[in-house]
Amino acid sequence: MEKKERPPVYYSEYLQLNKILNAQQPESSKEGIRADDEMLFIIIHQTYELWFKQIIHELNIVRGIFKQPNIHNNAPDIYNSVHRLKRICSILNIAVSQMTILETMTPLDFLDFRDLLKPASGFQSIQFKIIEAALGLGYEQRFGKGYYLSQLKPEDVDIIKKAEEEQSLIVLINNWLERMPFVKDKNYWNEAEDNSDFWQSYRNAYVNSLQEGEKQNIKTFDLLFLNDAEYPAGRKLSADANRNALFIMLYRDHPLLHLPYELLSTLLEIDEMLSMWRHRHIHMVQRTIGKRVGTGGSSGADYLRSAADSHYIFKELAELTSYLLPRNELPKLPASLVKELGYTE
């Protein structure tokens, strides 16, 4: 087929530079006040919003993958998901590092224009709230729920509520983990050496590994991995998903579990990077405005600190490290399962 002729692409037109480079309108200039650092302040925050847009783009692709009713082991979907989640980590790393540039603005420099911004605040970032909702931070888990939507325009509140109604990544990951057959398929375990349930065998090895001060972990282990009827309510991961996530972490060296493990590990890294970003923000706010309230009316650094401590999305995955065993103490897997985990026909 003959290649279609396309008009030439011009750099500045392709990037819409006329719009971007004329999108900085300092409030201080409107008032005839000299505030040389307001340009930096605007550009930093515009850059954040562009990165947030890219993160949302990547999350939408990953969520689209996990909305499928089945993801075949030989499909490129899991690799693609891990690749895009790692890209999000790289972007968040830039977001943390970018704070260094903003910190070149001294408290006195900020005071030159700070009062002109009220009641605007980074707390009004719609895209950041969409990212949190897309990952799985539900309304009920948020610190300061009464304040959370109070500073937004009605049309933006609608956007956030719509985002929260969509299936979040952690819900989709939970559904994917639930479908994994390795532990709950009795056909594998009928041929096990002691013909016992995997989790009972694992519990025995786990109990033997605990030191005297760790014995209280046994009760929690039983609740999370053995007693489905008593599985704690309100957890983001179901009992099956929780068990399968730990199984992936334990037997990650088997080829079929390489990418699932990378996926879970990258989700934890996203939580870590978001936490670093929040805490870096806290220190910057303390350094810049001290104990004064934020421009949006929040308690400033105190509000940010409380939110940072409660907004972990993949906390349940992180807690699974409490139940790991050294490789040499792991229950031996049945031969048929080892074969299946090795990409063999």
Image: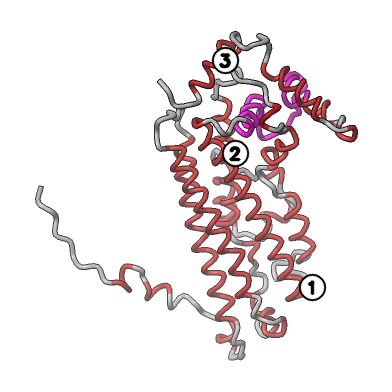
Q: Nearer the viewer, residue 184 or 146?
A: 184
Looking at the image, do the residues carrying marks 1 and 2 touch, with CB atoms under 8 Å apart?
A: no
Task: Point out the frontmost of discs 1 and 3.
Answer: 3
Q: Which mark is residue 170?
A: 2
Residue type marked 2: Ile
Q: How far apart are marks 1 and 2 (CA)?
A: 36 Å
Q: What stretch is highlighted in magenta?
A: 222-250
Residue beneath the point at 72% across and 18% down: 201
**Secondary structure under badge 1?**
loop
Task: Point out the frontmost of discs 2 and 3.
Answer: 3
Of labels 2 and 3, earlier in sequence is 2
Q: Distance between the residues labelled 2 and 3?
A: 24 Å
Of labels 1 and 2, earlier in sequence is 2
Q: Which secondary structure dominates the residues rendered in magenta? A: helix
Taking 262 as reference, is 17 above or below it? below
Residue beneath the point at 55% across and 20% down: 181
Q: Which of 283 and 164 is in front in this view?
A: 283
Taking 52 as reference, is 232 above or below it? above
Q: How crowded is mark 1: few (under 14 residues within 10 Å), some or many (20 or more)?
A: some
- Where does the image place residue 192, in percent across and percent down from the top left? 62, 12
Q: On the image, numbered disc 3 is attached to which residue?
A: 185
- Where does the image place residue 321, in percent across and percent down from the top left? 71, 38
Is 140 on the left-hand or right-hand side of 340?
Answer: right
Quadrant in the picture for residue 345? top left
Q: How far apart are marks 1 and 3 (CA)?
A: 58 Å
**Extreme front residue here?**
328
